[in-house]
């Protein structure tokens, strides 16, 4: 992790302003996103594109047509207490590059209003829900569970990691009884 951060700072990111954006997902989605890399990838693209659209739109509003920006996103799969919590850390160039008079110019974003952060979040949510409704890859029942994996022992354990509930043990763990003569392990 430290080597990756050092490489990004020393060799990849330009010497411009940077801003971190973090996106977390609703609890009922986390287990599915941890298991479905393609879906997590699509939702990551939606978020990054939304942030970049905000930057280029603001630059265009300040007469920097054709502005470009960039970002690097890292998916973190757990929270600090090691619960399943896929979420995104995006480091964005805090402004845009554009050509002016034949030269490449940097235009920093400047102060970001709380309402602007809210607009980016609202746009991300709308685009994400539109994608999920159109593609249907994430089904949630009235209890917040994915009905496609209900009853699966590993999924039940994963769900307990997300919800913070005690993991299932004994009969509710499923059909897996210990082999004859083998005592269950104690922690």
Image: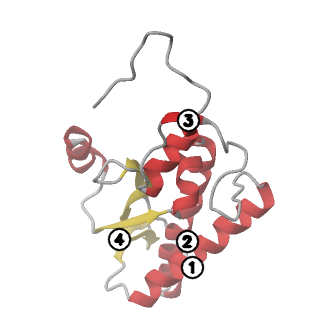
Q: Which residue lies furthest to the front in this view?
A: 181
Q: Work out how far the residue at label 2 is from the one at label 4, CA to CA, in angstroms.
A: 13 Å
Which mark is in front, 3 or 2? 3
SS class, disc 1: helix
Report the side of 76 relative to 25 (left or right): left
Task: Point out the tag, 4 or 1, that comes first from the N-terminus.
Answer: 4
Local crowd size for mark 2, using a 10 Å CA cut-off: few (<14), some (14–19), many (≥20): some
Check residue 122 in the rendering and tell me which mark sits there, or answer none: 1
Q: Work out how far the residue at label 2 is from the one at label 1, CA to CA, in angstroms.
A: 13 Å
Q: Work out how far the residue at label 4 is from the one at label 1, CA to CA, in angstroms.
A: 20 Å
SS class, disc 2: helix
**Residue pointed to by mark 4:** 94
Which mark is in front, 4 or 1? 1
Q: Work out how far the residue at label 3 is from the one at label 2, CA to CA, in angstroms.
A: 51 Å
Check residue 171 in the rendering and tell me which mark sits there, or answer none: 3
Task: Point out the tag, 3 or 2, that comes first from the N-terminus.
Answer: 2
Residue found 64% across the figure and 62% down from its top: 143
Residue found 24% across the figure and 60% down from its top: 15
**Residue pointed to by mark 2:** 53
Compared to residue 108, the image places residue 87 above or below, namely above
**The C terminus: image quadrant:** top left
Q: Position of residue 129 (x, y in %)?
A: 68, 67
Q: Where is residue 21 in the image (x, y as percent from the top left)?
A: 39, 67
Task: Point out the tag, 3 or 4, that comes first from the N-terminus.
Answer: 4
Asked if labels 1 and 4 touch by Cβ distance under 8 angstroms, the answer is: no
Q: Position of residue 142 (x, y in %)?
A: 69, 65
Q: Which colour scheme is used?
A: secondary structure
């Amino acid at each position: 992790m430290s080597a990756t951060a050092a490489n990004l700072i020393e060799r990849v990111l330009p010497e411009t302003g940077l801003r971190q954006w973090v996106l977390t997902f609703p609890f009922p989605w986390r287990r599915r996103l941890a298991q479905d890399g393609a879906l997590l990838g699509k939702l990551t693209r939606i978020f990054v594109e939304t942030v970049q659209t905000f930057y280029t739109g603001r630059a265009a509003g300040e007469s920097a047509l054709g502005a470009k920006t960039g970002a690097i996103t890292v998916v973190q799969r757990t929270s600090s207490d090691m619960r399943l919590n896929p979420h995104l850390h995006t480091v964005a160039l805090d402004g845009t590059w554009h050509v002016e008079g034949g030269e490449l110019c940097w235009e920093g974003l400047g102060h970001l209003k709380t309402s602007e952060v809210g607009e980016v979040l609202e746009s991300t949510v709308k685009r994400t829900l539109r994608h999920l409704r159109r593609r249907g890859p994430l089904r949630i029942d009235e209890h917040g569970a994915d009905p496609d994996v209900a009853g699966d022992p590993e999924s039940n354990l994963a769900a307990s990691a997300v919800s913070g509930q005690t993991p299932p043990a004994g009969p509710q763990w499923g059909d897996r009884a210990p082999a004859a003569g083998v005592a269950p392990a104690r922690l």
